[in-house]
Amino acid sequence: MVNKRPCYCYLFPFGLGHSGVHNPLEAGQSPADLQQIGALAVNPLGDRIVDSFFPDGNHRVDFPGFVRVLAHFRPVDEEDPGMRDPKQPEPLNSRTNKLRFAFQLYDLDRDGKISRQEMLQVLRLMVGVQVTEEQLESIADRTVQEADEDGDGAVSFLEFTKSLEKMNIEQKMSIRVLK
Amino acid sequence: MPPHRGPLWALLVVLVLVLPWAGAIEEEQGGASQGFQIVTFKWHHVQDPYIIALWILVASLAKIVFHLSHKVTSIVPESVLLIMLGLVLGGIVWAADHIASFTLTPTVFFYYLLPPIVLDAGYFMPNRLFFGNLGTILLYAVIGTVWNAATTGLSLYGVFRSGLMGDLQSGLLDFLLFGSLIAAVDPVAVLAVFEEVHVNEVLFIIVFGESLLNDAVTVVLCSVFESFVTLGGDKVTGVDCVKGIVSFFVVSLGGTLVGVVFAFLLSLVTRFTKHVRIIEPGFVFIISYLSYLTSEMLSLSAILAITFCGICCQKYVKANISEQSATTVRYTMKMLASAAETIIFMFLGISAVDPLIWTWNTAFVLLTLLFISVYRAIGVILQTWILNRYRMVQLETIDQVVMSYGGLRGAVAYALVVLLDKKKVKEKNLFVSTTLIVVFFTVIFQGLTIKPLVQWLKVKRSEQREPKLNEKLHGRAFDHILSAIEDISGQIGHNYLRDKWSNFDRKVLSKILMRRSAQKSRDRILNVFHELNLKDAISYVAEGERRGSLAFIRSPSTDNMVNVDFSTPRPSTVEASVSYLLRENVSAVCLDMQSLEQRRRSIRDTEDMVTHHTLQQYLYKPRQEYKHLYSRHKLTPNETEKQDKEIFHRTMRKRLESFKSAKLGMNQNKKAAKLYKRERAQKRRNSSIPNGKLPMESPVHNFAIKEKDLEFSDPEEAPDYEVEESTGGIEFLVKVTKDTASDSPAGIENPVFSPDEDLDPSILDRVPPWLSPGETVVPSQRARVQIPQSPSNFRHLAPFHLSSKSVDSFLMADSSKERTHILPESTHM
C-alpha cells in the first residue's frame, strides 16, 4: 500500500512534527498544521478533509496514516480486475474505497448512513449565503429522497454508491502525480 | 438606431471619406509671390503625423461604433470587424486613387505595433501558471512549430512536384521557407479571439504561451531558410544545417537573456525613483522597448526578450513604484496594446486591397489551408498524448480541439512574408496573397466559429443525460475534495523548484531590486485593508442611494436578506450581489452548459426545477472553473472573492469556535499599542523566528490565519503577514485575496525548504518574538461577530481582524458604525 514512499517524503514536510515540541510520542502532524495551508481555508470542505486525516479522534497523524489517506486518490490501476487476487483486500484507490472516503466525509457520526441532517450540514457548507434555510432543507430533502431506496430517510453507503454509479469517480477523485 | 448615436456614425463616415484624399492633397502652388498671406495651408508640413493620427482616430472610433451594438460584438469578434473595416477602407482608397498608399509595412509593424502588445502580455502574465506549465508550452512552441513548418512545407513541395500547382518557380527551400512562416501561431490573433471565448486557465496559458514562445523558432527557421535560399539549394551543406540548429538555441536563449538583463535593469532603476515619481511609468516603457530593440539589433528573438522583460520585472516594479504610477503603467499598457491591435487588424484589411500582389493559385491556396489545419490537429493530438503521461492536469479532448482550432495565424506571418526579398524568392507575390488569405481565413472563420464550436462541444459532452441532484451535489463536493487534496499534497517537483526560487528571490534578488520600504513593510496588506474599506464605503453609499437612506447599515435584521424568487428561471434581482452572480453565470460563455440547458428544457416538477436552480446558482464553484486571468480589455481580475470571503469567514469562525470551546477562560488584558508600534518598526522580514512555527501547544494562540496575496500575478511572493496596528491592541490583519487558487504554491508551505516565515501562511503561530509569552494582548473592544446573512452584511466583515492572543473576540475594522449593528453572539467570556 505504501509503495511510493520516497516521493511522498516531499509531501510530508510541514514541520515534520517539529512544531517546537520535540516530543517523540507526539510525532506527526496535528490538525492545525494542515489548517495552515492557505487554500484550504477557502475550500468549503477544507476542514472536513483535514479532519479526515485524523480518524478516531486522534490528534496526530503519522506518516503512514497520512499516506493512507492520500492513497485513496491514486488513479485506478488499469489492469484487468480479474487478474487480481480476490482474497486480498481491495486496494485503497479502488472505486469503492474512493466512494467510501467521500462517504465518510459526509457521515460524521459514523453510523454508516447519511442522515438528512448530515446532508443538510454538507449543503450548508457548500452553498452560498444567499440561500435561505427553507430552501436548503428542501434541497436536502430531495437529495436524500432521490438516493434513498429503502425509505429509511437516510442514505446508506450502498445507496450512495448506486446514486453515483454513472459518475466517473475514477477520474474525479484521482491525482495524477500519485501514480 | 437611437438618435444619440447618429453623430458618431456621421463622424466616422466623414473621416472614412476624407482619409483617402488626405494622401493626395497637394499644396497650393504659390508660384508667384503673392505678398504676405495671413493664413496658409501647409499640408505637407503636417502630412505624415496628421495621417498617422487620423488613422489612429479612425481605428478608435471604429471600436466605439462596433461596441454600440452588443449583439454584433457577442457573435463577431472585434478582430473580424476591424478586418472588414480595413477592407472597406482599402477599397475606398483604391477606388479613389488606384494606388495602395497605405499598407502595413514590416518596419512599422515590428517596431511600433508589435512591442506594446507583447509587453502587455508579458507584464500581465500570470507567472505561476506560466512557469507551471512551461514544459508543455515549450513542447508545443518548439516541437509543434517545427512539426507544422516541416510538414506543411514538405507537403506543399510534394504537391508541387506532382504538378498540381502548375508552373511555379520555387524549389524545396522556398516551400520550406513558406511553411516556416505560415506555421507560427500568432499571439495577437490568439489573444483577440480568446478574449471572447472563456476557456479554462490552463488551456489559455498553453495556447497563449505557445504563441509567444514560438517566435524564436519562427525567426530562426525563417532566417535559416532565407539564407539557404540565397545560397542556392545546391550549396547547402550539413554544416549549415548544424549551424541552423545551434542558431536556434542562441537566438532563443539569447533573447531571453537580453530580456532578463533589461528586467533587472528596470527593477534596479525603479528602486531609486522615489523622488521622481512622475516619470516612473516612462522607465517601464522605455527600458522594455530598449530590450526589444537591443535584441532585434543582435538578431536575437525580440519577442522573447520583451516578453521575459515583462515577466521578470513585474514583481519588483510593482513593489517599487507608487500606486499611481502602477495604475498609470497598467492603463497605458492596455491602451497601447489595444490601440496597436486595432491598427494591426485594420491595416491587415487595408493591405489586402493591393492588386499588385494578387496572385492566385488555386491548388496552392487551398492546399495550404488544408495542410495547416490538418497538420496542426495531428501535431496537437500527438503532443498531447505524450504530454498526458507526464502532466498532472490532463488535457482532454475538448482542450485539444480548442488548441488546434485556436491556432490562428496573424499579422506576424504577414509581416514576415512581406519582408521576403522578391529577387530571391520569385514567388513572393503568391506567398503574400496566400498568407493574407490564410490569415483572413483563420481569424475570420475560425474566430467566428470557435465560440459556437466550444459551446456545442460542451453541450454535447454534458448532454448525455440530465444529471441527478445527487450527482450534481456530490460531483461538486468531489471537485472541492480534489482541490483540497491537491493543495495538501502539492506538486512535488514544481513545489521544490518554486521553493528554491522563492528562497533565492527573497534572499538575493529582492534585496537588490526592491525598494527597502517595499521589502520591509509589504504594503500590500495595508493596500488591501484600505481597498476593502474603500470598497465597503462605496458599496454603502451605493446601497444607500438605492434604498434612499443609509439607515439599513444599522439594522442587521432579516430585511437585508436576499429575497429571491425561485419560481422563475431568472429571479428578480433585488440586491446587486444576486444580479452579479447571475450576470457572471450568464454573460460569459459559461462552459458549464448544464445550467443553460436545463433552463431551456422544461422540467416537469417545479420543485425539482427550483432545487436544481438553487443548487446550480449557489453551489460554490470549484477552483478550476472560475478563473479568467488575462484580459486585453479589462483590468480587474475575477469576481469570486465573494465566494472566497464567505467560505473563508465560515471556516475561520468554525475554527475559532472550536478553539473557544477548547480553551476556556483565557485571561485578557490590554496591551499598550505603543510598545507594539515601536517594536513593529524594527521588524525585519526575515525575523528571528527560530523555526517555521511556534509551538502550537502554547495556550495563548491557536488558529491559523490564512493569508493570501492580493495580486494574482505574483504568487511566488511569499505570503507575508503584517502585524497591524489599529485601535488599541494587536490584531493580525487577515487578507482575503481575489484569486485564491494562485496563492500558495499549491501545497504545503514548507518550512523545511525555507525555514523563514514567508512561505508558511500561518501567521498566528508567529507571535512576534518581541512579545514574551507572558504578555497577552487583546483588543480593547469585544466585538461579536455577526453571522453573515446577506452579502451586504458580509462585506462588513471584510477587513477582518483576529487578535493574536485573545480567545474569542473579533474586532471590526471600522469603528463605531460597525459596532452598532453587531449582533451578540453567545460567548463564554
Image (spheres, coloured by chain):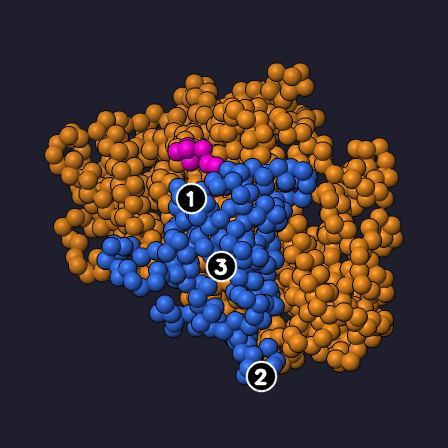
Chain colours: A blue, B orange
Residue B375 percent location from the top left of the image: 26, 41
The chain carrying label 2 is A
Q: What residue type is labelled 3?
A: Ile
Q: Identify whether B618 is placed above or below A44.
A: above
Say which quadrant the N terminus of chain A sits in.
Answer: bottom left
The chain carrying label 1 is A
Residue B626 at least partly seen: no
Q: How many angstroms separate mark 3 from mark 2 (CA)? A: 27 Å
Horizontal side of residue B356 vs B81, given as left or right: left
The residue positioned 52% from the left and 71% from the top of the image is: A61
The residue positioned 39% from the left and 41% from the top of the image is: A166
Q: Mark 3 points at which residue?
A: B485
Q: How many angstroms separate mark 1 from mark 2 (CA)? A: 47 Å
Q: Pointer 3: residues within 10 angstroms few (<14), some, or many (20+)?
A: many
Residue B178 percent location from the top left of the image: 27, 41
Residue B149 percent location from the top left of the image: 27, 45
Secondary element type, mark 2: loop
Q: Do the residues labelled 1 and 2 touch (CB within 8 Å)?
A: no
* Residue B471 among magenta residues: yes
The residue positioned 65% from the left and 66% from the top of the image is: B704
Horizontal side of residue B656 vs A146, given as left or right: right
The chain carrying label 3 is B
Foreground residue, B380 or B262?
B380
Between tags 1 and 2, which lies in front?
A: 1
Foreground residue, A98 or B493?
A98
Q: Mark 1 points at which residue?
A: A162
